[in-house]
Structures are given as structure tokens and as C-alpha cells.
Image: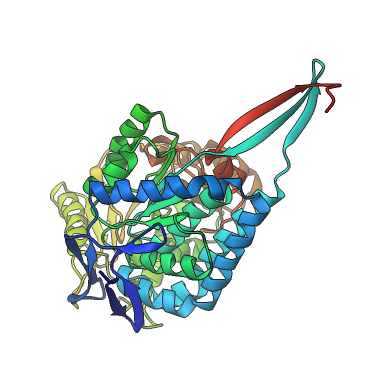
């Protein structure tokens, strides 16, 4: 049977799985539609099951010894070649991702798709440049060696499918593991395109496999396979608990990034124009960003001037087609998600929390929710404590630094935080005191790929980024040889 392909934005994309260097279909399928035009079906995509999962793990297991036997430098050559192919296909990848996920085309072309190539080059070079730790102790010569762990399952979310797929698979491949990538069912097409690009770049068959389907079906089967030796997941805490239980049962290392409810803290000595503009910028991608500062915490003495600036910046947003350069806020991913966002706001309104702006579906129709700001009556409110993952922010004030830190640390989440202040001393104090995996001061979303990335609390376990990701994807061995031994 031949591969089935569809044309998406003028680009041919396979709707089948990529397993062991070939395309594999499934009897069942699921529909993929574009957030920008929900009436238009983009594709019917192969819906994997337990048999598909086993086939993918078979392929990754067979390919593993050959890939693991390559030096880090040889694997780096492969990854650099794939990065070069990505660089040559930025426009085509962006066209598919724009329709599939709904992110702004301009952002994809300028920032997101090129980041995929940067991910591959970064981890390839880090792995190739790694120097083993060597020392003498008690008459022995000691070395710490990174051993490739085995097949790795990588499960990515729908909100940043291209960037997160490359971000996660790059360290796994650089470390010598083979990969089974399972993209989210709401936005799977760029992962399929990535499999084609990997084949074109000459990646050996079975080193990168892509399996599509529903998480509870094929995803659950993948993580339950005892041949899998690493699991990396980005998604909800609820799904992570299930995956984590399976990983624990099989004694498989597991890393998870699980979203956030980040504070954006504004002190009276801050540049209010910059802080308000950045706060209004949290509506980017319709708030479907786990790192977003969704809880605005503003020093009481500057609350009114901050709100004036914030509303002016938010008023300038344009809700529209992600292909239109004038658009600043795009549609949400799916009608189910739009309903979920509306449910949060409706419950907040019913509980008596003040809606300062928005609070309704966009008048123009489509999968848009109006950028919303809510002043909660108390800090225990659901709208403060739970992740909405939409264009909904809350607004609270604080009297002093101690209260600001207490509010910032008052949720179960701890992925990221944003602090605006004119004081270097306060930046250090507050930055250290806030419980979060990343704290930005007077900026946002500036990423160094060598830095650790992950969350505290229910925002996740483990760290990705730099050597932290390479260590996760390796088994460490101490080789200890008696000094003076001869050949």
C-alpha cells in the first residue's frame, strides 16, 4: 500500500506514521482541522494503536545499537545535516504549522522554525564537545562515561509542536538514543513533515520514528513498553501522573514539563510603559503559552497608572488570521479548548470576581476569545490557582516586597516568573525568593539553550536544556582502572 499524502498550504504532508524508515498506515483515522478555518478539514491522519506502538519500538530498538555505536561527533554530523535541511525549508514548515496550529506565520518564519535547526545544532555541538571527567583516587584512574540509554519516547503538546519536538528529540539523538515521537492529535502535521526532512538528511532508518494518534491509545502503549528507556513529556499534570506511574512501574527515567501559572510582578520603581506592554503581550498566541505571566501582581501605589498603560496596549491588539502580519492575537486551537476557556471566565463571573476587560467570545466569531483581565476577590479563586491556557489574565495588587513574593509563590505551579523593577538589589532578592524554574527580570522569553529548563511543584519534574538534557538521556558509568596496569 502506498503512502497517503495531503496538500497543506501547498506542501505535501504524509498522513501516515513514519516507522523504521518507511510510512505505515492505520485502519482508523482522526481529523485535523485548522484553527484559522475550522470548517476546512486539513487531513484525515492515521490513528495509531498498541500494535503501531509496538512496531515503532521494534524499529527504534533495532536501530539503537548502530546509532549508539557512532561517536558524538558522527551523530553531530547527522544532526547538522538535518538542521541544514530545516534551514532550507523554513517557509514550507511555517506554512504547514500556521494552518495546523494557528500560530502567527510571521513568528514561525522569523523565530520558531529556525529555532528547530538551532536546537539540533546546539545539542549536537554540546555532545561532541563533552569531555569526560577523569581523576585519580586510591590508586585508580577513574572516568565517568555517558552511555546511550536506549529508545526514548517523546510526547509533545499541541501549542508549540515544531519547536518542542526539535527541542526534545535533539538531546535524545545527540546522546545516542533512538526516538519515537508522538505529537499531539490536535496539531500533528509538522511532526510528519519532520520525518520526511530527517529521511532527506540521511538519518538512518529507525533512529527517528513518528507515531500519530490519541494519547490514551497509542501514547499509553508507547510509554508502557518495557523496551523504552527514557520518556520525555510536555502536557498537563493529569496526563503526567498517569505516564509517571507507568514510568515508575517500569523503572524508566521520566521528565515532564507541565505548564504554569506564572506571576508577572511590577514594582513601583519599574519602567511602567515597558511592564504594561509586556503584560499585554501575554495575550500572544491567545495565551496558549505555558511560560506566560498570567497573574499580574502590581504594587498598589502604581496600580492605576499601570492599568491605564496596560489597557492602552491591550486595545492595540488585532485578533485575526495568523497569516496577516497585522494580527497580534490568533485563534485558539480547538472548539473544545475555546469552551474550556469560556468556562473558566463564566465561573469567575458567577463567583463575583470583577471582569476588567473582555470576558466573552470575540464578536467577530471564529475560535477567538476576547483578551480578558479579571480582578479576583481572593487569592484562592480558581481563576488565580488553575492554569487557563488562554487569553485570560488576573490582576492583583500588593503592598510591599514580602507580600509580592507570598502571592507569587501561592500556587502549586512554579514554571516561570517575570519581575519588573528598577532596582538591581530587588531583582536579586525577588529572583532568588520566587519559586520557579526560570525567572526573567525586565524581559521575557529570552532563552539560552545551555541553561536548565523545567518547573517546580506541579509544573514538572526534571530539567531540559544543555548538559542537563544530555545527562537525562544517558546512563552514567564510572570506569575505574588500577593505575600501573599495562597492555
- Left or right of 43, for residue 289: right
* Residue at position x 59%, y 37% in the image: 147
- Left or right of 266, for residue 131: right
Residue 144 seen from this side: yes
Whether residue 344 is situated above or below residue 413 in the rendered picture: below
- Left or right of 224, for residue 106: right
Image quadrant assignment for residue 307: bottom left
Closer to the camera in the image, 180 or 160: 180
Residue 263 seen from this side: no
Q: Position of residue 131 (x, y in %)?
A: 73, 42
Whether residue 271 is situated above or below residue 133 in the rendered picture: below
Closer to the camera in the image, 68 or 103: 68
* Residue at position x 45%, y 72% in the image: 108
* Residue at position x 41%, y 82% in the image: 325
| Number of marks present in the image shown | 0
Q: Position of residue 357 (x, y in %)?
A: 27, 64
Quadrant in the picture for the N terminus: bottom left
Q: Position of residue 240 (x, y in %)?
A: 32, 40
Colour mapping? rainbow
Q: Position of residue 49 (x, y in %)?
A: 22, 50
Quadrant in the picture for the C terminus: top right
Whether residue 220 is situated above or below residue 188 in the rendered picture: above
Whether residue 247 is situated above or below residue 215 in the rendered picture: above
Image quadrant assignment for residue 92: bottom left
Amino acid at each position: 500500500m502506498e503512502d497517503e499524502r495531503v496538500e497543506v498550504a501547498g506542501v505535501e504532508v504524509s498522513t501516515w506514521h513514519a516507522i523504521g524508515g518507511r510510512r505505515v498506515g492505520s485502519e482508523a483515522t482522526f481529523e485535523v482541522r485548522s484553527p484559522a478555518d475550522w470548517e476546512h478539514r486539513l487531513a484525515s491522519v492515521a490513528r495509531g494503536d498498541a500494535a503501531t506502538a509496538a512496531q515503532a519500538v521494534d524499529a527504534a530498538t533495532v536501530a539503537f545499537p548502530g546509532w549508539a555505536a557512532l561517536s558524538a561527533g558522527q551523530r553531530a554530523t547527522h544532526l547538522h545535516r538535518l538542521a541544514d535541511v530545516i534551514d532550507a525549508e523554513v517557509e514550507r514548515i511555517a506554512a504547514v504549522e500556521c494552518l495546523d496550529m494557528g500560530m502567527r506565520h510571521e513568528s514561525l518564519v522569523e523565530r520558531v522554525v529556525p529555532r528547530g535547526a538551532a536546537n539540533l545544532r546546539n545539542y549536537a555541538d554540546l555532545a561532541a564537545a563533552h569531555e569526560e571527567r577523569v581523576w585519580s583516587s586510591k590508586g585508580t584512574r577513574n572516568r565517568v562515561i555517558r552511555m546511550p540509554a536506549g529508545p526514548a519516547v517523546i510526547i509533545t503538546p499541541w501549542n508549540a509542536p515544531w519547536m518542542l519536538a526539535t527541542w526534545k528529540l535533539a538531546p535524545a539523538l545527540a546522546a545516542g538514543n533512538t526516538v519515537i515521537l508522538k505529537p499531539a492529535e490536535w496539531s500533528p502535521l509538522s511532526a510528519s513533515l519532520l520525518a520526511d526532512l530527517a529521511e532527506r538528511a540521511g538519518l538512518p532508518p529507525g533512529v527517528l520514528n513518528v507515531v500519530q494518534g490519541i494519547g490514551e491509545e497509542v501514547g499509553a502503549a508507547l510509554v508502557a513498553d518495557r523496551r523504552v528507556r527514557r520518556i520525555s513529556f510536555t502536557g498537563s499534570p493529569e496526563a503526567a501522573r498517569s505516564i509517571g506511574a507507568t514510568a515508575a512501574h517500569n523503572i524508566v527515567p521520566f521528565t515532564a514539563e507541565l505548564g504554569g501559572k506564572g506571576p508577572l510582578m511590577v514594582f513601583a520603581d519599574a519602567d511602567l510603559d515597558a511592564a504594561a506592554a509586556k503584560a499585554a503581550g501575554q495575550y500572544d498566541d491567545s495565551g496558549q503559552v505555558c511560560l506566560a505571566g498570567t497573574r499580574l501582581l502590581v504594587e498598589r501605589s502604581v496600580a492605576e497608572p499601570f492599568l491605564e498603560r496596560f489597557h492602552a496596549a491591550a486595545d492595540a491588539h488585532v485578533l485575526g488570521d495568523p497569516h496577516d502580519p497585522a494580527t497580534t492575537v490568533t485563534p485558539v486551537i480547538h472548539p473544545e479548548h475555546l469552551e474550556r476557556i469560556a468556562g473558566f471566565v463564566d465561573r469567575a463571573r458567577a463567583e463575583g470576581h470583577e471582569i476588567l476587560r473582555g470576558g466573552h467570545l470575540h464578536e467577530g466569531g471564529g475560535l477567538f476569545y476576547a483578551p480578558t483581565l479579571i480582578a479576583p476577590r481572593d487569592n484562592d479563586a480558581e481563576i488565580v490557582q488553575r492554569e487557563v491556557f488562554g487569553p485570560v489574565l488576573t490582576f492583583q495588587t500588593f503592598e510591599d516586597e514580602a507580600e509580592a513574593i507570598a502571592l507569587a509563590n501561592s500556587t502549586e505551579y512554579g514554571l516561570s516568573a517575570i519581575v519588573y523593577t528598577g532596582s538591581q538589589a530587588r531583582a536579586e532578592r525577588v529572583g532568588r525568593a520566587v519559586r520557579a524554574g526560570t525567572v526573567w527580570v525586565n524581559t521575557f522569553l529570552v532563552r539560552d539553550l545551555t541553561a536548565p529548563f523545567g518547573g517546580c511543584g506541579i509544573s514538572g519534574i526534571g530539567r531540559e536544556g544543555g548538559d542537563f538534557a544530555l545527562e537525562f538521556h544517558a546512563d552514567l558509568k564510572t570506569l575505574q582502572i588500577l593505575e600501573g596496569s599495562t597492555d
